[in-house]
Image (tube, rainbow, N blue to C red):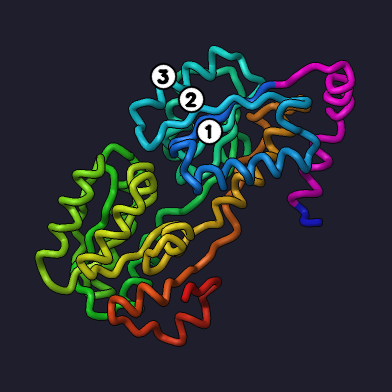
Amino acid sequence: MRRREFIAGLGGAAAWPVVARAQQSGQMRRIGVLMTLSQNDPEGQARIGALRDGLKQLGWIDGRNVRIDYRWAGGDVDRLPIQAAELAALKPDVVFAAPTSALVAMQKVTRTIPIVFAQVSDPLGAGHVASLARPGGNITGFTQFEFVIGVKWLELLKQIAPGVARVAIVHNPNNPISAEYLSAMRPGEASLGVQLSPAPVRNADEIERAIVGIAREPNGGLIALPNTVISANREQVIALAARHRLPAVYPLRYFAINGGLVSYGVDNHDLYRRAASYVDRILKGEKPGDLPVQKADKFELVINLKTAKALGLDVPMSLLARTDEVIE
């Protein structure tokens, strides 16, 4: 048993009699879940599956001793405020919200209902928590990337496609963390000999225009920053990159699984599974403000060799040796 899991178990032990009595009396607890992807999106279901598996291992089964109410934004972040208000009106014991845009919407409608998040890049800098060690309010959870990972994405792109000289950073300008990633990546321009070009996208039409624009000049490549617009339209992004023969680096595994060239990032399903432990502890009586924000500790590099071959790229053996998963 890992130390983190052992400590989590100790933290919940004192409150266990309370939840045990509630379960014996037939009291149904309530969890709200706010997600940005579509309900029929396989990735969205995989994330929720990880959360539900984590809850099940801790004794919480939907329909038996807990009711889980879901809201899915379908990639449209404008729907999140309404859905967040709907969940708050249900008066759940705790809400799980992911990623950042869902947390922001939920935080705006309640300062009292406990909120557990996952896939949030900078909860302290964005003002979601007072500190990482002691969040202090009604919010805690699990972070994903630190912004300096952007330089790693640039290095990967140059390793797998050395001829790339111009790199478009595809991002949602309405997402405040985009500027932080761009700032962290700027030092890589001189050291790697590339020119960065922000490519803002807010919807599918803007994605197509941006990628077509990238392809107009030679030696181009792209990096997709993590955000709901890109995730919800990932098939379009991947298809356009392939059509215009643009080497691309993505932030999460499912992009490479779906045909993207390479991905490097956290195991986000692990974050959802771990988040179940905090939902459990809150249901057993602990306060979110006392539960420290935890960082991602599992990263994975995935390379799609089929896509590399289609682009005429020879992946260096030194890179393949470090790869966690190769898709052929």
The one of 314 and 107 positioned closer to us in this rendering: 314
Q: Which residues are magenta?
A: 4-29
The residue wearing badge 2 is 106
Bin the neighbour count of mark 3 within 10 Å (Cα to Cα): few under 14, some 14-19, many 20 and up: some
Asked where in the image residue 304 lies, by quadrant, the reply is bottom left
The residue wearing badge 1 is 97
Q: Secondary structure at mark 3?
A: helix
Q: Secondary structure at mark 2?
A: helix
Residue at the spot 48% in from the left edge and 72% down from the top edge:
327
Nearer-N-terminus badge (3/2): 3
Q: Secondary structure at mark 1?
A: strand
Q: Amino acid at mark 2?
A: Met
Q: Amino acid at mark 1?
A: Ala
The one of 16 and 72 positioned closer to us in this rendering: 72
Picture coordinates of residue 81, whole percent (x, y): 40, 22
Picture coordinates of residue 172, whole percent (x, y): 28, 43
Position of 152 relative to 171 (above/below): below
The residue wearing badge 3 is 82
**Mark 3–mark 2 CB contact (< 8 Å):** no
Instruction: Decide whether the magenta segment is chiefly helix, strand or loop.
Output: helix
Bin the neighbour count of mark 2 within 10 Å (Cα to Cα): few under 14, some 14-19, many 20 and up: many
Judged left or right of residue 6, residue 223 is left
Position of 129 relative to 188 (above/below): above
Judged left or right of residue 169, residue 108 is right
Q: Amino acid at mark 3?
A: Ile
Nearer-N-terminus badge (3/1): 3
Nearer-N-terminus badge (2/1): 1
As measured in the structure, the alpha-carbon distance from the residue carrying label 2 to the one carrying label 1 is 7 Å
